[in-house]
Image: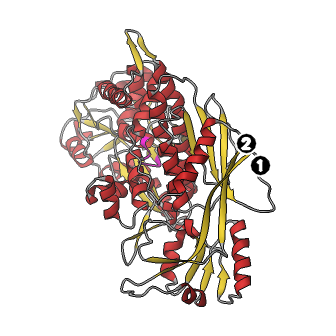
Amino acid sequence: MIEARNLSYFIAACQQLHLAKAADELDVAPSTLSMALKSLEEDLSLPLFAPAKVGLLPTPNAMWLYPAAVTLLHSESFARSFTAQNATEVADHVVIRPHLIFTIGRFAKAVSCVIEALRPEFPATFFEPRWDLGDKESSSPFAGRMASVTIDYERADVPASGTTMHIVDDPWVLARELPASTVRKPSIEELLSGPIVVPALHPTLLEEASRFIGSRRMPNARFVAVDPSILPQLAREAPDTSFLIPRSVLSIRLGLLRVHAALVGDALVSKISAWTDSDTPATLAFMEALRRHLMREERNIIFDPQLTLRQIRYFKTIYSSRHLTAAAQKANIAQPALSNQLLKMETVINQRLFDRHRDGLVPTLAGDRLFQASAAISLALEKLESGRTEASSHAGGTIRIGVLPAIDHTSQMLSTIAKAIGKWREIHPSVTMRVLEAPNGALQEWLLEGKISLAIVETDLPQLARFNLGQIEEMAVVANPRFGLVNQGNISFSELQRLPLILPTSVFGIRQEIDATAGKVGVRIKPQLEINSLPMTIMLVRENPLVTILPPTTVSAHVARGDLICHQIIEPAVSRKLYAIYSDSRPLNTPERNFIRLLREGMAIIPPKTP
């Protein structure tokens, strides 16, 4: 499961020239930071950093993740401040809309720094930065006031609306990466005489750049439709090229280790303003604080999350269940462990979240406030998961599939999965698939925590979103005919209780299906031996007066030699079935949907096998 602490380390790493400085700023060992970033990449199944000649470069995935992670971390900080204060029971919501091209630049850092600086003054106000201009307007998850602040470049032909405040002048620069051995940095005249590129910027900025280039008659300048957020990669690909950009696009950040920036001059200076139609104390305070912040030297935003996303999920489960036992069962965690997590949350917030009674739990006012604030965390997490799904469906990525332990390697179940994987690889050659094996309880927990995308299991789990993939084959009683334990022909399910059975443990789908059928027909099945090894099971049945229950394909070679015999189980029959289960916290992406489709197609052409 993605954790807030790892996201905060990721943000810090992106804001420094190299990881050693980020580790120093976080006051952690460099190895701790590296492990956290590696864990985050594994949780996302996406590469976030690429090696460069010197240090690392953030990948396009990192540029997508940065604003999503910032919003999530702001929501965690707000949840703590709102829950801890006692004066207000209703939260307000201020949406910050920077109509600027996003980069890990000065403005991105400034907006976050100001939001956190205002937290003590406005503990009941959730300031939400929305850098994605494609975000649809949505209602607030809170019952209080909703307002917005827009940050944009000034235009002479567009009159100001509402309360407007000039925030900062943004001078343009020519930026170029220089070799480490450079002694004398080039002058602005030298940079202007060389090749110049203007990346894809705000329309107002492109107009200003076009006028400047036209007035200076610069035939060596060209406009390219490339996102300025990948400036470090562009600089390395074109080392002799200068980039004409506003200075705010640059900042101290990963990948910009040797970039020299020279001011163009007063002829090219953009002006940035903020305005709001809601003159609330929070919106006005934000605009003034942002103006003052940008007058000072650039500063990084350092998040220090105290609540984990797992704890938030546990809290919401407890809040809806109002009873620790029921919540623990729903969250698939032991009750003492769940109680311990709740106590940790109350210690962090310094507030009691529930009053304990004999018949259950009653939320306190602090508990009600945290539940209200958790809506912001849930929305931020949904956006992050949606972005991850979209990123995984493009340009590679990794999907993780979980399966229950299979008792045999020749079963029709494994054959069907293996064939589906082969066809899937032809459709998605650039996507990596990892198949992980674990018992049913672990698969369920991994799904809820986001460690796997979906799981292929042999038992129906109604609490999870699922597809019924169909029936594989019917089970049979397997015995050595020389011991005479089973009469010729079929055997009814009720007769199983008198047989000396060897069965696998309940981590296997076969055992789970047998136990479930026994419960339905009122029969008690008690095996004499529980063994999870197929070779050992077959050997014991061959050499001893014991029987087992297996798919006939498992022992087909032994049946052909006459060593063993299969008796079909009837009244009722026991069949192996496959289910694809997944978490409904995010939609399945294209590679995941295609894998399920291939499984279902494979199942449709395989008739159930009987002895």
The residue sitting at the left extreme is 543
| Residue 571 visible (yes or no) | no
Q: Is residue 452 magenta?
A: yes
277 relative position to 342: left or right:
right
Residue 423 screen position, x and y as percent: 52, 63
In screen coordinates, is 450 left or right of 126?
Answer: left
Depicted 495 relative to depicted 467: above or below: above
| Residue at screen point 46% across, 39% down | 76
Q: Position of residue 469 (x, y in %)?
A: 53, 44
Task: Specify whether residue 216 is painted magenta.
Answer: no
Is 468 rendered above or below residue 14?
above
Quarter of the view holding residue 352: top left
* Residue 382 x/y as whole percent: 55, 44
Q: CA distance from mark 1 to mark 2?
A: 7 Å
Q: What residue sits right under mark 1 in the picture?
A: 161
Q: Secondary structure at mark 1?
A: loop
Q: For numbered disc 2, what is the local secondary structure?
A: loop
Q: Quadrant of residue 576?
A: top left
Query: 436 or 134: which is nearer to us?
Result: 134
Q: Main secondary structure of the magenta part?
A: loop
Disc assigned to residue 305: none
Q: Residue at x 68, y 37 (%)?
A: 139
User: Could you tell me which quadrant the N terminus lies in?
Assistant: top left
Q: Which mark is residue 277?
A: 2
